[in-house]
Image (cartoon, helix red, strand yellow):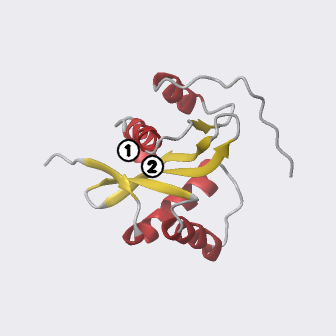
Amino acid sequence: MQSTIQVRQADSRDSTQLYGLMREYIVDFYNQPEPSEEELKGLIRHLLENPSSGVQFVAEENGKLIGFATLYFTFSTLKVKRQAILNDLFVHRDVRGKKVGETLFKTCLDYIRKHNFAGMTWETAKDNVAAQALYKKMGGEISKWVVYEIK
């Protein structure tokens, strides 16, 4: 039996599996401290209940979530329109190579175009060459802007 991968906007029935994927993304993939269960579930709930601040898309195969992407929304003063930030794009290691990341990326891109956003920006780690190859393949370009951060 051939499995089919479906990408769709996350809804409340995804919360438990999405929590597991997001925890894996944060802790196992990016080696960041584990957030409390309450905080992470609160973020998922916030996005589900407040779609004006952002949306999540999930990739599902045979009833199991295998990837997700998160768009957060802000504004571009220069373009006088809403702007999307692709903050997360993650595919479980067991299903990488099946174009799940591409499909999630295209879904995000379709969403911002359908809703007339100014554009979509994103970042990835300097050493994440797999992600950089995907973004280049999808038509992404390295921004002329320099990113700063402070903690």
Which residue appears farthest toward the right when viewing the image?
Answer: 150
Whether residue 54 sits left or right of residue 95 in the image: it is right
Q: Quadrant of residue 122?
A: top right
Direction from residue 45 to residue 38 in the image, left or right: right
Q: Which mark is residue 73?
A: none
> The residue under label 1 is which amino acid type?
Val
Badge 2: residue crowd in 10 Å (few <14, some 14–19, many ≥20)? some
Could you say where residue 44 lies in the image, as x and y percent from the top left? 54, 67
Identify residue type, mark 2. His
Q: Residues within 10 Å of mark 1 (few under 14, many from 20)?
A: few
Helix, strand or loop for disc 2: loop
Q: Position of residue 23 (x, y in %)?
A: 57, 61
Relative to 62, is 46 on the left or the right?
right
Displayed quadrant of residue 105: top left
Residue at the outermost front position:
80
Is 72 drawn above or below residue 108 in the view shown? Answer: below
Q: Are marks 2 and 1 in contact (CB under 8 Å)?
A: yes
Label 1 sits on a secondary structure element that is helix
Where is residue 35 drawn, in percent x and y?
Answer: 67, 67
Residue occupying the point 49% across, 59% down? 21
Q: Which residue is mark 1?
A: 95
Q: Nearer the viewer, residue 38 or 31?
A: 38
Q: Residue at x 57, y 53 (%)?
A: 25
Alpha carbon distance from label 2 to label 1: 6 Å
Q: Report the disc number at residue 92.
A: 2
Residue 16 percent location from the top left of the image: 45, 71
Residue at (67% x, 31% y) in the render: 127
